[in-house]
Image: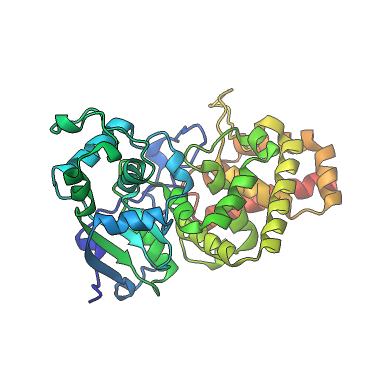
Amino acid sequence: MVGQINLEKFVEDKEKNEDDIDMEFNDDIPDSKDEEVSEDTKMTKPFDPTKINILPKQDVLRNLIDRLRNNEIDMSTDFQRHPDLWKPDKMSRFIESILIRLPLPPFYFDATNDDVWLVVDGLQRLSSVRAFVIEKKLRLINLEYLAVCKGKTYEELSRTYQRRIDECPVTLFNLKPGTPSEVRYSIFRRINTGGLVLNNQEIRNALAGDPLRKFFNKITQNKYLLQTIGNQDSRMIDQELILRFLAFYEMNYEQTSKNIAQFLDDMMEKLKKKPAGELDNLKRTFENTIERCWNIFGENAFEKKTESHGARRRKNSTLFEVWTVALAKLSDDDAKTLIAKKTKVQEKHLDLMKKDNEYFRSITYSTQKREHFRIRRDKVQQIIKEVLGA
């Protein structure tokens, strides 16, 4: 029987502040005394909880191993390469907990596609099982109780211990087909308890599917992107910046009541539905735009500067948003003119950051507010208009 799970009763909301703290590439956060309470991931229109369709199921680990062996659980998500993943000693102690019959925490899956499940919670535990049982590349180390198993691979275990792995009871909570996309994103954010807590873009990556992951990975290798923002792939900051550009370029932020996180979620869903040709066009648009940014601002692109900050270099996500979108919408001729007058563009923008408090606040505090979005958009467009008309 399908259980209608009320998530509020049994999971802690671990949503991450993403935007209102003025996401800086070097984590330089503005003075909190001016900061408002973040509304970034708070739902403006919460979904109907009756649409949460999760099936609780008691199973044995052998069935999950069979799915892993047949590639029926998606384990290719990019965030698995993050350096904070479990090391061999922690993986070994998890396997030991199975061998000594300790109860395991439940596994959560997005089973909207029954042929390939997505891991909501339990990725690192499954990675440990795969490494030990299927790939056979893990040798048990630093065990606390089973000295007899130290140094052994799966094949070197006695049949008694192999059977304990197969018969290990597991509890599964499977998100079923028909669950709306906004519910799926919310559940991923809320049920996110592993050793590596995922941020919003890593969650989007988990739900994206392989074609869209490849789309973003290709763009992140663009030389002009790397020159303007540096290497920002450790927690997918680069991918979120690209997604932010695409969302503000393709959709009207002023006509939605959604917060930034949901706005970007929606763009991911739109991208999933686009044919390969449209994705290629968007890729070319972004790459052309980021080249324009480099040709105008160089290595100083997207830096927030004021008199008080001196020479300190601070990259800013809202500057990335407003300048990439503004430059993307220019004709080739206007872009060439702007590049030829880049010194004037740089001077005007630096002057704006230093002297216009309204603009500075719009790129620093409560950046998702529609009023702040309009301020930074209009003032950047005014700079462009003035330079082109000069």
Q: Is residue 21 left or right of residue 243?
A: left
Q: Is residue 87 left or right of residue 336?
A: left
Q: In the figure, residue 118 lies in which quadrant?
A: bottom left
Q: On screen, 206 above or below 141?
A: below
Residue 269 appears in the figure: yes
Q: In the figure, residue 52 lies in which quadrant?
A: bottom left
Image coords of residue 28 (percent x, y): 47, 32
Specify the quadrant that holds the C terminus: top right
**127 or 301, which lies in front?**
127
Image coords of residue 197 (percent x, y): 35, 44
Image coords of residue 44 (percent x, y): 40, 64
Q: In the figure, residue 107 lies in which quadrant?
A: bottom left
Image coords of residue 137 (percent x, y): 37, 36
Q: Residue at x 30, y 32 (%)?
A: 139
**120 or 69, which lies in front?**
69
Q: Residue at x 58, y 67 (%)?
A: 273
Specify the quadrant that holds the N terminus: bottom left
Q: Residue at x 29, y 54 (%)?
A: 13
Residue 190 appears in the figure: no
Q: Is residue 75 left or right of residue 290?
A: left
Colouring used for the render? rainbow
Count of marks placed on residues: 0
**136 or 31, which lies in front?**
136
Q: On screen, 242 above or below 262?
A: above
Q: On screen, 293 above or below 182?
A: above
